Amino acid sequence: MSSAHETAAAVRSGSRSAREVTEEALRTITARDGDVHAFLTVLADEAMARADVIDAAVSAGEDPGALAGVPIALKDNLCTRGVATTCGSKILEGWRPPYDATVVEKLRVAGAVVVGKTNMDEFAMGSSTENSAFGPTCNPRDLTKVPGGSSGGSAAAVAAGFTLLGLGSDTGGSIRQPAALCGVVGMKPTYGRVSRYGLVAFASSLDQIGPFATSVADAALLYDVLAGHDPLDSTSLPMASPPAFETIEKGVDGVRVGVCTDLIDGCAPDVQARVRQAAEALAAAGAEVDEVRVPEFAYGLSAYYLIAPAEASSNLARYDGVRYGLRVDAEDAAAMNTATRTAGFGAEVKRRIMLGTYALSAGYYDAYYAQAQRVRTMVMRAFDSAYASFHVLLGATAPTTAFALGDKVDDPMAMYMNDVCTIPSNLAGHPAVSVPFGTGDDGLPVGVQVLAPALAEPLLFQVARVVEAAA
Amino acid sequence: MSTLTGTTWETVIGLEVHCELATATKLFCGCTNAFGHEPNTNVCPVCLGLPGSLPVLNEQAVELAMKIGAALHCDIRPSTFARKNYFYPDQAKDYQISQYDQPINADGWLELPDGSRVGITRAHMEEDTGKLTHVGEGGRINSAHHALVDYNRSGVPLVEIVSEPDIRSSAQARVYASELRGILVATGASDGRMEEGSMRVDANISVRPAGDAAFGTRCEVKNLNSLRSLVRAIEYEAARQVALLGRGEVVMQETRHWDEAAGRTDAMRSKEEANDYRYFPEPDLVPLVPDIEWQARVRAGLGPMPADRRAGLVAALGGSATDAEMDQVRSVVDLGLDALVSAAHEAGASARLALARAANEVAAAGDAGLTLDPGAFAALISMEARGDLSATQSKAVLTALVESGGGNPAELARQMGFEALSADTLSGVVAEVVAAHPDEWSRYMVGDDKEVGKLTGFFTGEVMKATKGKANGKEVAAELRRLRV
């Protein structure tokens, strides 16, 4: 399959039909998704109908948009009108949203073809997609390995060639870490750049929707479609979003890159080696590269695992059996709530609800939630000082290459450590991207992470493009 | 205050008033804010708390909240929203979005008609819950077979007005609630209808030995759906606490439910009140910082408050009013009928007469009175004051005016056959009536004041019969007096 950009150009010019492109995607899914299990729902009929609409538009001389006929996979926490949206949880099984997420509507306007909804860790809580109530997804590069998570399904769909593009959500690294483990590009925009309306909330102050693609250019193309103000999301930034795709080849001449040792030193040696190579490549391309220490990043993980569960404990309260999804009947309303939630949530979700409830409880709030917010502010200030000297930062995305399925399911702390390099950007609300850069000693993909200050997405993509070109 | 075993007890009351804002749409979505529609017809993903939905703050609700704050002399401040977490089926998200530690309005006061002030701690914004109806086995929460939820009310904007514990009696609480209601209506923030739940009152009640500086342990009493309930509940609860303390027992701090039928408060099940709400800042909303210009526009746009309007009416009466007139003044202002009296006064008609007609005949017409054209009312009062119409005729024309919302009172009077009698015609009729009742007339001629008053009433009645109510009572009395000398 060619790139999303080329595919859209071909469909727009009429040299390829959206039907043909969509059929190919569906054929590949049918052939291989039994092994990978990237999808929870494949929308074959809907996708073909959509492809025909796009082809008809092209025949009528209309322009179906920047993503005309490009197949895309959506993480199953993005609301799709009339189509099951499970968040990888039994508690939402059978629920069909009566509305589309803002990003889904934007994709439709841009001519993309949604071919299915992808597997994920339940309510985006996890780093391996093993916390899905519907079984794990396997890494297409090695089916015995995890694809990362929580957006493992979308990462795997793109890595397996099922679709050219995917959407994920990133609360603590849930786009970038699976992108690294699957060997694709995954990007988290600035908090507020992309509307969260219709993204089922995990941790509202951290969640951002972002693109998966096989190349930096395609990720930028998709990002441009997603970004922009949405009056339905009060945290959406009320400003135009400068396009990133058209400046992607601007290079890194004079760009100051801080190689952040705190995002490298704790990683496996093969991962460290790749990040150092990427830094050298940037220097060779004209960037001013130097090392930078941001020791405050070490506290990010602890702060994150209080703030995110605290918000989640509130966001997930609504799954009470009253209005939608699973209901387990019992003698009164309170007992029904308990029975429903006991049966409907998996172990990791329950663990985080309990953690978060505890962190917000009377007598503990100041020591846990409020203290975590102070640490969050400290991390933001640490970023500010680093960005006083550098335009972007460079580090690893994940500490290791993909690990074996089952390896960490019984050790939550080991699983949480996967997010150590990605969490700081979420706490600060900054954009960051993971770019594939060679392989580890096991032959599996390594991701290099580029981090940028708020609103610096065009620069972020430029730097990422140079890293990609050197890989 | 009450006494028991020699101690004089003082009741200390603070009120929490929830006021539904009269916005077109809900607090965080575009659904219609209306009472009485088919259940679950004014709902959307946001107010149903569907996964993925997000709140967007309603500007009109902020404006009305600021109006309330300005009318209660509060500081209007930058504010934030928080989540109050608790599970309940009427709560779509299982948390309520409410202002918590940073309310939009704080530190104000409300002046009661007697000049005393009740401090306003805060007046903050929050969303309403849905409405539960318990079905089966008498509809009580503990015995119901199942419950139905109507989410039309879910997300309706509320302002909760919390008073300082400055109130000392059930009567003062009633006056406070009534005055606050008048202010809410005057700002346009609310229709103030307690019976529809537009205004709901919770009372924090404690008692202490008179003269003590420290407060006693308080109980919060809920489910007060009328001013009458408020008064009864405070009296019951204060007496309950005094009795407990008199027996040497203690008052437990708890939430109690007012049972209107039984006339008592009962402790709510501990399960229903033992909540740790786990407040934290609402991450889906940004801080609310109304700019100074907006605040200034809101303050400038505030019309006169009930106290100002009462003062205006008293001034129209010539600067003083009897107790009975003060009752009429309060009633007319509470009902929003004071514009009628002012119009009549400005047209040169008797303010007293206008006040009486507004407080009685117009008030009796209910909502219809609110749409009466002040110009038409003023014209009618002028006609009556001039003697063109008798009191009876004037009331009949007024009824017709209220029904039609306005019109030309002179024309209406003509259509109703209420032509004023000429002086000659009246003299003739009075003379005929006197001639027809010689016994009464001779008693009238020699009677004392009391007897004359009684017989004046008798003759006036006869003249009215003869003229089908067209005669003016005062003129009849004058004619009788003229014949007597």
Image: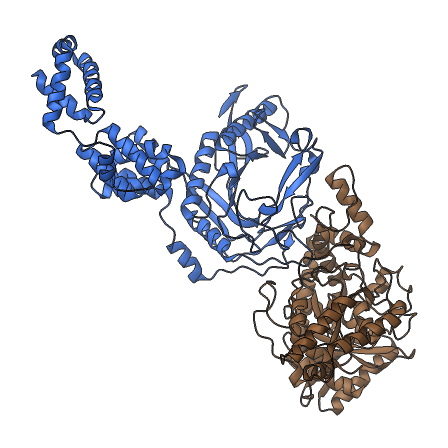
Chain colours: A brown, B blue
Q: Residue at x 74, y 38 (%)?
A: A332
Visible in this render: residue A10?
Answer: yes
Image quarter of the C terminus of chain B: top left
Judging depth in this view, the residue of A110 and A400 nearest the camera is: A110
**Residue furthest toward the top?**
B439
Q: Is residue A314 above or below residue B475?
A: below
Q: Position of residue B466 (x, y in %)?
A: 19, 20
Residue for point 36% across, 43% down: B371
Left or right relative to B395: residue A142: right
Q: Residue at 91% of width from left, 79% of height from top?
A: A441
Q: Tally the numbered discs.
A: 0
The image position of residue A77, as x and y in percent, is: 74, 62
Image position of A326 (left or right of B274): right
Q: Is residue A401 or residue B451 the one in the foreground?
A: B451
Give percent across and percent down for residue B404: 33, 40
The one nearer the camera, A106 or A399, is A106
Q: Could you say which quadrant of the image residue B454 lies in?
A: top left
Task: Tell me: residue B374, above or below residue A175.
Answer: above
Which one is nearer the viewer's eye here, A275 or B230?
Answer: B230
Which residue of the protein is positioned furthest toward the left in this rendering? Answer: B485
Residue B319 visible in the displayed image: no
The quadrant where residue A161 appears: bottom right
Q: Looking at the rendering, which quadrant does residue A190 occupy? A: bottom right
Q: Position of residue B96 (x, y in %)?
A: 63, 49
